[in-house]
Image (cartoon, rainbow, N blue to C red):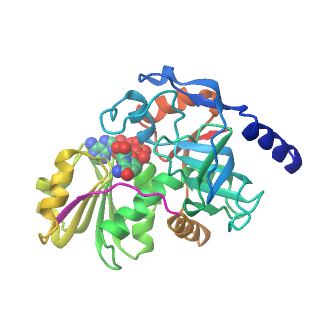
């Protein structure tokens, strides 16, 4: 679509309450509840961008919401449009925005509801970043939520420093593959854990040593780490602290009441345990883009699906990808 046509299309859509194509679900359930539908074009607020979505990617949070795993925690009605990762083109913005019509951008959507699997998505300017020419839309769609989680976990929660030793438990998935590379970019010794068929993949990301979680229990290891990043959410602080160095940090991605208690009770201890919740940030996307630009952050795509096959893409992530990210193309 050329710029005039896109502007015209959007103006008609927003002003007359027309609809766009979206993937949505009207009830909790398995991936079959996902279906194509006409959905109202989201309203863009001041300080926000409207993005024509060209690509997105699936994160475990998408199927966990869809299944209703968190219905008590975050109540909202139906229909719901899933997805938090967006790569696309700016089609509407404020005149004083640092973004302009036609910019290629990526974003980790800051709407609690998601909304990426649609023709248009909106987000605050502050959570978007320009995609460099050297980066494809598919790579840009793979980075936002998973890359931000990896960066914030290691930098903000783990207080990562050069020369430290870092263990990534769940190193071959969306978050883990970024975490291994980010920890290496800080000049750390990095050990990776995944299933044996991902040994070569984890080593190719730069990991110094590999553990197969089916063979090795890292909590019984003689090694000691400054940071244990439990991406998989399968480990527990009480066991992991045995392998933490003094002033070491255990970080988990798994939100739970127990985890919240762990965060509160262990923060004054010399070995802390924290649950992290990723926070959309344009600055963090720019840092990830910088690492990509200097060759320190590679993106591996497990598989790609068109938006119409979103159910298949969800099933792929839910049943466990080979490694890397599942990307959706609009
Ligand atoms: N709190 C937050 O803000 C936040 C943000 C993002 C993600 N998350 C959560 O983080 C988790 C990981 O996300 P992701 O996108 O990286 O998922 P993913 O792509 O499905 O990757 C899962 C990883 O866990 C590994 N794994 C599976 N079973 C394991 C075990 N028993 N021990 C150690 N590793 C194991 C997998 O290795 P193999 O494939 O080799 O088996 C893979 O490397 C999800 O639960 C997600 O909900 C939370």
**For residue 53, what is the image quadrant?**
top right
Relative depth, front residue between 125 and 134: 125
In the image, taking residue 195 as reference, residue 91 lies left or right, namely right
Is 276 magenta? The answer is: yes
Magenta residues, start to end: 272-281
Q: In this view, does 151 lie above or below 214?
A: below
- Residue placed at 55% from the left, 48% from the top? 85
**For residue 22, what is the image quadrant?**
top right
Query: Where is the N terminus found, in terms of image quarters?
Result: top right
Can residue 172 be seen at all in this image of the molecule?
A: no
Relative depth, front residue between 164 and 57: 57
Can residue 258 be seen at all in this image of the molecule?
A: yes
In the image, taking residue 188 as reference, residue 260 lies left or right, namely left
In the image, taking residue 7 as reference, residue 57 lies left or right, namely left
Q: In this view, does 153 lie above or below 110?
A: below
Residue 306 x/y as whole percent: 65, 33
Relative depth, front residue between 15 and 77: 15
- Residue placed at 11% from the left, 61% from the top? 242
Is 262 magenta? The answer is: no
Looking at this view, name the residue that lies furthest to the bottom.
162
**Magenta residues, dominant SS class:** loop
Residue 327 x/y as whole percent: 58, 42
Residue 222 x/y as whole percent: 14, 64
- Residue placed at 53% from the left, 32% from the top? 313
Residue 302 x/y as whole percent: 53, 43
- Residue placed at 33% from the left, 78% from the top? 161
Query: Where is the C terminus found, in terms of image quarters?
Result: top right
Q: How many labels does the image show?
A: 0
In the image, taking residue 199 as reference, residue 128 lies left or right, namely right
């Amino acid at each position: 679509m050329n710029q005039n046509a896109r502007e015209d299309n959007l103006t008609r859509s927003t002003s007359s309450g027309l609809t766009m194509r979206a993937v949505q679900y009207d009830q909790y359930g398995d991936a079959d509840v996902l279906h194509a539908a006409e959905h109202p074009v989201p309203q863009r607020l001041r300080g926000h961008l409207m993005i024509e979505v060209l690509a997105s990617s699936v994160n475990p949070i998408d199927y966990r919401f869809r299944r209703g795993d968190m219905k008590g925690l975050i109540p909202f009605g139906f229909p719901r449009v899933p997805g938090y990762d967006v790569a696309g083109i700016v089609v509407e913005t404020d005149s004083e925005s640092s973004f302009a019509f036609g910019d290629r951008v990526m974003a980790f959507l800051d709407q609690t509801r998601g909304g990426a699997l649609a023709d248009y998505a909106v987000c605050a300017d502050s959570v978007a970043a320009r995609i460099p020419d050297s980066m494809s839309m598919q790579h840009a769609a793979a980075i936002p939520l998973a890359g931000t989680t990896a960066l914030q976990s290691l930098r903000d929660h783990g207080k990562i420093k050069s020369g430290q030793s870092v263990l990534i438990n769940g190193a071959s998935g969306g978050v883990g593959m970024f975490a291994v590379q980010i920890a290496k970019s800080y000049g750390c010794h990095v050990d990776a854990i995944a299933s044996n068929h991902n040994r070569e993949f984890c080593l190719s990301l730069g990991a110094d040593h590999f553990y197969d979680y089916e063979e090795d229990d890292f909590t019984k290891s003689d090694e000691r780490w400054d940071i244990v990043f439990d991406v998989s959410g399968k480990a527990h602080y009480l066991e992991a602290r045995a392998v933490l160095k003094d002033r070491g940090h255990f970080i988990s991605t798994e939100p739970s009441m127990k985890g919240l208690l762990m965060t509160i009770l262990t923060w004054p201890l010399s070995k802390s345990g924290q649950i992290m919740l990723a926070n959309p940030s344009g600055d963090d996307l720019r840092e990830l883009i910088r690492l990509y630009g200097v060759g320190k952050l590679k993106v591996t795509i497990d598989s790609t699906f068109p938006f119409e096959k979103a159910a298949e893409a969800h099933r792929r992530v839910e049943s466990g990808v080979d490694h890397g990210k599942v990307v959706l193309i609009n």
